[in-house]
Image: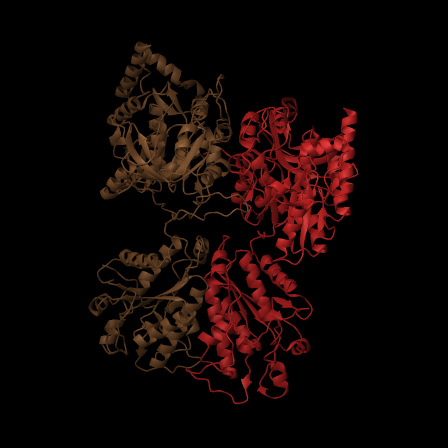
Chain colours: A red, B brown
Amino acid sequence: MLTPRDENNEGDAMPMLKKPRYSSLSGQSTNITYQEHTISREERAAAVGRHEGFRGCTIWFTGLSGAGKTTISFALERTLNKLGIPCYGLDGDNIRHGLCKNLGFSKEDRQENIRRVAEVAKLFADSGMICLAAFISPFQEDRLDARKIHESENVKFIEVHVSTTLEVCEQRDPKPSELYKKARAGQILGFTGIDSAYEPPENAEIILDAGKDGVQQCVQKVLDHLESKGLLPEQIPDVPAVRELFVSDDLTVAELLKESQNLPTVELTKVDLQWLQVLAEGWATPLSGFMRERQYLQSMHFGQLLDLKHKVAFVGEKSDDKEDSWPMMDDINQSIPIVLPISDDVKKGLEGVTRIALKYNGQVYAILSDPEIFEHRKDERVCRQFGTNDPRHPAVAQVLESGNWLLGGDVAVVQKIQFNDGLDKYRKTPNELRAIFAEKNADAVFAFQLRNPIHNGHALLMRDTREKLLAEHKNPILLLHPLGGWTKDDDVPLDIRIKQHEAVIAERVLDPEWTVLSIFPSPMMYAGPTEVQWHARSRIAAGIQHYIVGRDPAGIQKPGSPDALYETTHGAKVLSMAPGLSALHILPFRVAAYDKTAKKMSFFDTSRKEDFENISGTKMRGLARNGDTPPEGFMAPTAWEVLAGYYKSLQNSN
Amino acid sequence: MLTPRDENNEGDAMPMLKKPRYSSLSGQSTNITYQEHTISREERAAAVGRHEGFRGCTIWFTGLSGAGKTTISFALERTLNKLGIPCYGLDGDNIRHGLCKNLGFSKEDRQENIRRVAEVAKLFADSGMICLAAFISPFQEDRLDARKIHESENVKFIEVHVSTTLEVCEQRDPKPSELYKKARAGQILGFTGIDSAYEPPENAEIILDAGKDGVQQCVQKVLDHLESKGLLPEQIPDVPAVRELFVSDDLTVAELLKESQNLPTVELTKVDLQWLQVLAEGWATPLSGFMRERQYLQSMHFGQLLDLKHKVAFVGEKSDDKEDSWPMMDDINQSIPIVLPISDDVKKGLEGVTRIALKYNGQVYAILSDPEIFEHRKDERVCRQFGTNDPRHPAVAQVLESGNWLLGGDVAVVQKIQFNDGLDKYRKTPNELRAIFAEKNADAVFAFQLRNPIHNGHALLMRDTREKLLAEHKNPILLLHPLGGWTKDDDVPLDIRIKQHEAVIAERVLDPEWTVLSIFPSPMMYAGPTEVQWHARSRIAAGIQHYIVGRDPAGIQKPGSPDALYETTHGAKVLSMAPGLSALHILPFRVAAYDKTAKKMSFFDTSRKEDFENISGTKMRGLARNGDTPPEGFMAPTAWEVLAGYYKSLQNSN
């Protein structure tokens, strides 16, 4: 149900008063309160023209007083502005006070009013803006004139009938004006719907039932129409769509599986399969498969995807002009390559083939088409990706040990990627997470990337972040998102971490009402500033707007040294500047330590340093192995038990 | 002298005919020919909003019929559009046919006409556009009203008096309308300037003497005013300005030199000095000095300059908000860091200082201010910049042997950087080169980066490139631009190369009419795909639009291997995709070899491979050492003598 704004600012809603005023060149429209536009000039200017192409047109809202025309048109203006589409609203505010201030409310003057508005709207549309005109405009003839003014000069005119019934409008009768009441009482004459006719449009492009549908639904309907007419950029940059690579219908899956029996096969490693999952579920939207050389070079040299063309032609050579049809409206951050290494032998077997089956453990997971094989320049790659080629770095070693070639190409994924380890229920795709957040009525989602057990300091940080977000949001939801792909041997394994996280939530250290625990399928790379961008960017697919980052994200010890490999501030610094992440708010990770006085984890306070004790991972492991418990308030007790059990079992197995 | 367009499309220029028509709501303005705007909607849309910031305002052109109002306003519209500034023109065309078609030419109607135009102009200005209104608007009162309409809502109104005298206007009296003639003959009544007064503005912001000045001068005057009011972006993105860091006036230089006596000093290496020259002359525009950590990280991770803020703050920390005022309109490619390494000892001496003298060989070259010292993570840097950390790579070695810290900060350069090696006359700055190209009436400049002797195959390529450019340009000029900074020991030294190039030009193998030989001051890095971007991007400062690239640009042998270090196609591929180079046309380097049949260098033809012989550098050096001459047509004979002499002297000194 739409609750309209006070609509007494609608120029042509102004009724003829009992003593009709004389319309003259010096005549003044009275009884019109001037209302500021809800979008400032600065906001408009920031939005103007983020997209290419001419989309000038006029959207003409007609309907009874109180129907919701202005409310919808203002909401639409805000949305278009967000999308970077230049638009400008005409309504009683800026028309009756200015251009039409010398018109009264006689039939002739009302006609002239509409005509002038239509002429001005046409000029705005001609200038390349979407012009939003919201006027009762009760007469079919006048609206047809307005249309003709546009169409005779080849300017698109979109009539929107806001068809809220008289009953609903009269019920609303917004204060303080209460125009319907006055009209019923005979204090106003010639009021549309009461004693003056409203002629509903016969050929309106859009009919909005704003008596039933909410504002956002109405706006969506207009957006859908604009989109169908090619007037919108195909993708909404602020709410990027998720590109899943799953084949959705069973028949096609069956056909592909049949086809795969005759295709050459590439056997995936577990890490390859994890990357396939990342791609399939849309975490790396808009990638359509494993990177071709073109996107690989873009990622290596610029940390971005710049386009989705297939071939990177040598200067002067012809390109094949193949290009993925997914729209690229904005910079896409892509600091890490997502590639499929293959060996010399596998490459030999793929010469001249156009489609390839990707298998893991004998099962077909995907068909790769339009393959491109290019050199896996491993030493150069690790240098650029990790800033080191030290083979003692476990992820660097993984790359250096992989195949000499990279196989790029589009993938069609024929089955959900699961691991049957009891944790698949936590493996939510970005779209599934979006649905969960919507169901929870989240109006903000903040993500916490982790690959370690949660102590109460972390929980404090997350609760504190939520408190801060509550200043501007009603229901911020936490995406507690442990990384679930490959990690180095001495990290705590995924199953233990999940049990530990479950215990933290069960003890309500993190409130299950606003916490969503899910597994992020990506393998770990320990690539510091390069990787943290991936951690943030990939979560955008799940609909997050806030990402928490601290010191040395995705960091690792420098091999053979006690120092960190990456400068510990670089991750957050690079993340804060990275192209393609402007939609994301980067939130600081505040460091908490054990507060011996308060007997709980508190944010570190330099003024009473001596009260704080840092309980390091090493210390924690020592306590666990010895069967000791950490200080009260360090970690939820049942969560501690999970960890203690794990470390004990490790000790036993050693 | 301004030759105006036919101005009979000026709405309010329309005179009252002898039989005054009745002004009614259905009245039609007659005698008005509709004229298409000179800028299409698509062109406008492409320009809309390339720049941030609100610059909505109205520029109101007033003046006699034939004064040049419309001509100037159209030219201004085109210029603003080129600059990416959204604007829209109102004039008789789009007003008299539409909004004001129900107005005649009575005094009252003329007033109302101007009022409506002013109201619409205000709306456009409010929407963020620059609105150009060109109307005779002869009466001071009406124009004051138009101003009030704007200023009462805080919208800028700029009145431009196009003050062409009646005599000039009447002389012009554009056909076919010949309105002045008709007015003089009494066929038209109430014609402004003849039998109706023109009241010149008393407080016009701008007065244009379009009877004397040309259109472009008039447009420039308006642009200057807009700029002074902060309504223009300061930099024109299509013709980027060069940012020199030289201190221009002698007095300041003297003061700085005096100050430097009391400043801490950093002694530059020769390579540092070469980088200082690069910065000082503006090759790295818009850098204001040696990179701070912020720009260093941008360069390392994204191959670009993203902004010119000083500090890169850790998330959650306060930034000092210092930002360089140079406008950053577009992506700036910056694939390589330009930094000043200092040792631990030098760093110790700089604690707490705010200004530092940069010296070379005891002479002060620059003052560095607002210094920032950050860690020179050398191994990480060479990995990211070179894709290798092999110390056998001579430029990698240079970095690895340099200081552990980087000193960033703004530099004010107090003297031209010269080397007194007899070659300084070839060291032209970007601005000097621009002046030379302008003097030669170049309408296209193509650059050839080289660090080797020129054989006739190169010359063939350059002549061929010029021929190709002649299809679209009248006078393409070649910037023959040998790199003059540090090179590895076994490259041919600069002085020999320049002598060799001089000989090639003296023999007119390259035509001196269209060849400009100049030295590019940058040191060499042999960083392949990363460096070729720098080679192309830096030359934009000199005003080039075309850059020639071939296989393995800025390449080097892989240490300890006969192979190239970089994949030989990557350079051109990366260059063709690199952000911030969209203004540049990348031209292919066509390979020429010695054609034994034709006895000259020809472009390699695969259909008659056997006719071609590749004369490698090794073979060439062998011939030179043995006192042999290469095959006829391989190289200009006097140029060969230079080389032969060099290699012989090398042999003797060994």
Image location of residue B83, percent across then percent down: 39, 53
Q: Is residue B339 visible?
A: yes
Residue closest to the eye, A631 or A103: A631
Vertical position of residue B356 compared to residue A398: above or below: below
Horizontal side of A386 relative to B46 (left or right) equals right
Residue closest to the eye, B200 or B472: B200
Place residue A375 in its image quadrant: top right
Q: Residue furthest left?
A: B167
Q: Is residue B303 visible?
A: no
Vertical position of residue B208 compared to residue A481: above or below: below
| Total numbered badges shown on the rendered structure | 0
Vertical position of residue A70 compared to residue A271: above or below: below
Place residue B198 in its image quadrant: bottom left
Image quadrant for the C terminus of chain A? top right
Image location of residue B96, percent across then percent down: 39, 72
Image quadrant for the N terminus of chain A? bottom right
Residue closest to the eye, B345 or A269: B345
Vertical position of residue B102 compared to residue B484: above or below: below
Horizontal side of A290 relative to B28 (left or right) equals right
Image location of residue A103, percent across then percent down: 47, 80
Horizontal side of B355 relative to A144 (left or right) equals left
Place residue B94 in its image quadrant: bottom left
Image location of residue A33, percent across then percent down: 51, 76
The residue that appears at 68% across and 66% down in the rendered structure is: A213
